């Protein structure tokens, strides 16, 4: 046994692990320690500036039973899932066109897609206020076309405006993993299907889509996980109807000075997001299996 250990210690794998282990341990510590601290805080109780370190479940009871938090959880999940589905649906045709018809200009297309995202995220969110505002671009265009007689007030400061802004903000991040997955597909499989009489739709649903499922899944998770806890977008374009759970967490860590409750809301959000993501990935795989049949 000791001989095997010595041989493994002198192997290339062991040298590579020894090389990356300091960085890996540091990264894991920076990721895990904040999560552990948040979990510990969620079981404590804070009264003004003093913290009671005794174990209790009052914060989780409040997070799961109080109507305001329950509504915010449901709204955040609904907005996040809607944004994820809409983003993937919009990103897939673009990624497919670039991969299968981009030719020599694939890198140029990818660069053009990412150009708007070289600007500040805050500026991109604020730009939608100019588009959807009462005197914004969209209302001005509709008035000029004669389709409306007065500006529409419901375009901004609601859940719909949050969804529109988030879809625009994350669509490029969904295109890239789908594109990478499509690039790995053997084109001879598509050609074989076409030789056997498959049209474009059947080729997409029976060959391309099932084989690109890893990219679709990655894109879905890349969009869903951050958007459910987004704070800036609902704050700027959501109004009272577009408030999400991140705002409640910020209030408890800020003005309310109730860190344990804020921590419990954060942990509950992480669990709900992980559960919803797992269920959606499972549903996506079952749907693709059904398409294959």
Image: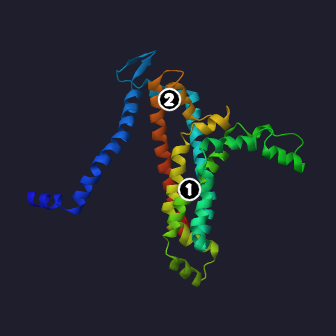
**Which residue appears at 69% of the width and 37% of the height?**
158
Q: Do the numbered discs 2 and 1 sit on residues whose CB atoms are within 8 Å?
A: no
Q: Where does label 1 land, which residue?
A: 174
Q: How is this picture coloured? A: rainbow
Q: Which mark is residue 63?
A: 2
Image coordinates of residue 110 in percent, x first then y, are: 58, 62
Q: Is residue 280 left or right of residue 79?
A: left
| Mark seen at residue 285 | none
Determine the secondary structure under disc 1: helix
259 left or right, relative to 95: left
Packing grade of label 1 (10 A; few <14, some 14-19, many >=20) is: many
Quadrant position of residue 71 = top right
Nearer to us of marks 2 and 1 is: 1
Q: Nearer the viewer, residue 272 or 175?
A: 175
As drawn, 11 above or below 37: below
Circle 2 residues within 10 Å: few <14, some 14–19, many ≥20: many
Q: Residue at x 55, y 34 (%)?
A: 246
């Amino acid at each position: 046994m000791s001989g095997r250990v010595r041989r493994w210690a002198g192997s290339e794998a062991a040298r590579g692990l020894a090389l990356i282990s300091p960085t890996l341990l540091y990264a894991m510590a920076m990721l895990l320690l904040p999560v552990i601290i948040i979990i510990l805080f969620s079981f404590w109780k804070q009264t003004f500036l003093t913290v009671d370190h005794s174990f209790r479940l009052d914060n989780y009871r409040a997070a799961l039973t109080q109507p305001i938090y329950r509504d915010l959880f449901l709204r955040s999940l609904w907005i996040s899932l809607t944004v994820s589905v809409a983003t993937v649906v919009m990103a897939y045709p673009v990624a497919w066109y670039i991969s299968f018809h981009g030719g020599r200009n694939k890198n140029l297309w990818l660069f053009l897609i990412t150009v708007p995202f070289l600007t500040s995220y805050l500026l991109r969110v604020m730009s939608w206020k100019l588009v959807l505002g009462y005197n914004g671009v969209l209302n001005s265009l509709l008035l000029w076309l004669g389709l409306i007689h007065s500006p529409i007030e419901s375009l901004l400061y609601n859940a719909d405006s949050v969804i529109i802004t988030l879809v625009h903000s994350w669509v490029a991040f969904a295109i890239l993993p789908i594109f990478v997955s499509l690039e790995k597909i053997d084109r001879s499989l598509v050609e074989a299907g076409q030789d056997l009489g498959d049209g474009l739709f059947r080729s997409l649903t029976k060959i391309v889509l099932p084989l690109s499922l890893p990219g679709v899944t990655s894109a879905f998770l890349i969009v869903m996980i951050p958007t459910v806890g987004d704070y800036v977008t609902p704050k700027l374009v959501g109004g009272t109807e577009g408030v999400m759970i991140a705002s409640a967490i910020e209030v408890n860590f800020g003005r309310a000075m109730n860190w344990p409750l804020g921590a419990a809301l954060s942990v509950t959000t992480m669990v709900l997001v992980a559960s919803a993501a797992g269920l959606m990935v499972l549903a996506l795989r079952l749907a693709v299996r059904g398409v294959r049949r």
